[in-house]
Image (cartoon, helix red, strand yellow):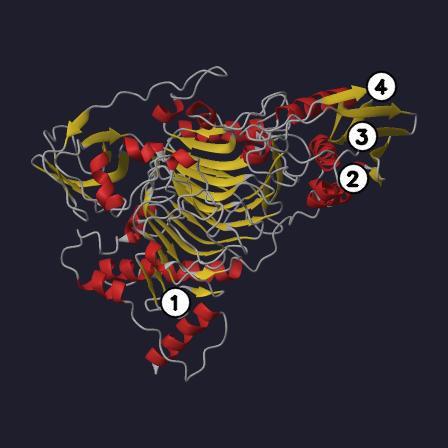
Amino acid sequence: MKLLVATLLLAASLTGGVASPSAPPPAESKFWLQFKDATDRSSPDILPDFSYAGYENSEKPIPDVASPIFQVTDFGAIADDLISDEQAIRDALAAAEKAGGGVVLFPAGKFLVWADRNKVDPIRIMSSNIVIRGARSSEGGTVIRSIHSGYYGGNYKVPKDTGDFLKIPYIFIFQEKSQFDRIPSAPGEAPKPAASKKLVKITAPLKRSTFEVPIESAEGWKPGDWLAIKAKSTMFSPELMADLEADPTWLRILEGLSISELHRVREVQGNTLILREPLLVNVGEDFGAKVARVDMITQVGVEDIAFQGGWRAEFVHHRSALDDEGWDAILFDGVANGWVRRCSFLNMNTGIYVKNSAACSILMTRFAGTMAHYNAAARSDASFNLLGLSRDWAGHRHGVSTGNRSSGTTVWRWKLKENQSVDSHGNGPYATLIDRVDGGSFTNSGGPGSSFPNHLRWIVFWNYSYDGTDKEPIDFWEYSKNGIAKFVKPLFVGLHGKPISLKEGSLLSNESQGQPVSPESLYEAQLALRLGSSPEWIGAMRSEWNSLVAEDLPFFGTPTASLDLHEESFPLGALLEDLTVLLGKQELGWGLPLEIQNAEPDPTLTRDYVLLRTILQQMATYATPLPKKDAGKSSFLQLPPLKLSLTATRDQIIIEMPVTASASDQKKNADCLKCVLELAPSCKAKVEDTPETLRLVIQR
């Protein structure tokens, strides 16, 4: 009887309905049976073991750290007073770091950071054992509200190179010192070279799934040390490319594939390091593989906080730094055994980004408000990270992203929006599990063409519920940059949801399409197999998540919500100068010269600065033509200047711009006008829309 009930519950959970007692039990996957029965898992035909992803390799629950406590209110923070709490937060964190660790605790209420638009700096944590904790991330809990963006006053260039990416501002950056030391000190300066670490040669070939790494000398190595197994070779291609041929434009892969797997030492036997996690790829003796010691900060976390940003515009990918990275919440850079749990992210451009980090868990997170760039990502030499039990109502362009040599990533029980991408960003990610994910599609995986394919071997979709409108049949190995992800022989097991046709030749297999399989979750089954039974924390956390996801968030993105406003006094001329730079610096043909007429006198306003700038930027987008390519060229045509006129009276300020966009362009940009009409009342303004002009009338 218990078996029948369990089978019915499995069928119901996968279909979203109520299982009939007559429904046949899900078939056991042949790929699972092959993995379970294998005594040697080095063959590339056998599934990777994804059960090592997450905090302490998923063997232990995330701890509830009790003490010492550092209350931000003891350092001067006051909830809901509309005054910046940033210095108090910094002081509380500094005290915790000085003490060797602790919990920096926020009570319920709203706390402000980045309130000075001329000074937006990340709050950086560079020590182990620091936990940032709020009261809860639902209604009535703790909100950390970032007012301004780190991109202001001319700095709107879309991040493109390593130096740009190193300087992206996040509210909280957990960063090991050697990663911090690479950040350029001046604009345009190249990143500083990574601190030199002794590279130790690996003295024998390494089989996939092995835990043993023989090296020239293990002197100085000890259990608990972190290391990176590094190699770059064209000889990885037969396995990681599954003997597929790369397009000539995929330049990085033609130069040689790179790996940088992060592992922890379990023990040292002579000159052999015994790892805690299995190697995920076969490494030949002539691949030039070496081991490098890696410094990490450990046992850090963020929990029970709602992060709120100021992104309210219609998102355009790579138009400006404000679109891509305007308000970002949390970065892990050089973190091991860290976590983010029970947090929510509202009107943020990026929620959580994990890089150069291992064995971290991102769990029970919620994303809402305005669509922007990322919800969560594990990329850039990140290994064995778990991203699970989360939901994205905002529909960020890149959903749950991997890329840049990430490996061993498990994406577990996420809920995405229709047509939101299951993202992989190219430049050599491999061994990723998409496990019991509902929603999403196969378009909008990112990365430049030179970094393709989007994902190398062993991307596994396990009981994935598809919810997209991709062009069919989907071919994962079509060379043209057509929006469909380039995945090396993806494996689909139990694909269901909307019916979809996949091109058979581009797949490893498509087992049981339309019918979910057993086990329901590959990650959970592999973990239970390895540990002898499923750990208690799995069931407890799933139950906790079912309750949490039903709770109301503090703010769902309602444009006129008065509590979301942050009013400040500023000269209108300063905002228009900022707007001029923003519009002029926009990329991909969106760059728009702005000519301001009748700018005198320069009135002072008390309004929400960010909201008013958003309104004017969206007005300009609606009023002007869409970007167009120069005929026969790859460059965009320059848009003509937009002439903006300003009229100030005792009672009103009127900002007027001509509408030069065609009716077709206006229709395509109708959401921009909708955004303006919704936001304007919050700035005590109204919009007058005629075929020839757009006017914003602001009451003084």
Mark 2, residues whose alpha carbon is within 10 Å: few (<14), some, or many (≥20)? many
Which label was assigned to residue 513? 1
The picture places residue 101, in percent across and down from the top left corner, at 39, 34
Q: Look at the image and tell me whether residue 659 can be seen.
A: yes
Horizontally, residue 459 falls left or right of residue 370, namely: left
Tell me the SS state at disc 1: loop
Which one is earlier in the sequence, the residue at label 4 or at label 2? 4
Residue 655 position, x and y percent, is: 82, 29
Q: Which amino acid does label 1 sit on?
A: Gln
- Choose mark 4 or mark 3, whichever is in front: 3
Residue in the picture at 42% in, 41% down: 425
Three-letter residue code for mark 3:
Met
Q: Which residue is under mark 4?
A: 598
Residue 657 circle label = 3
Observer-nearest of 225 and 18: 18
For the residues labelled 4 and 2, the Cα–Cα distance comes to 22 Å
- Cα separation between marks 2 and 3: 16 Å
Foreground tag (2 vs 3): 3
**Which mark sits nearer the N-terminus, 4 or 3?**
4
Q: Which mark is residue 680?
A: 2
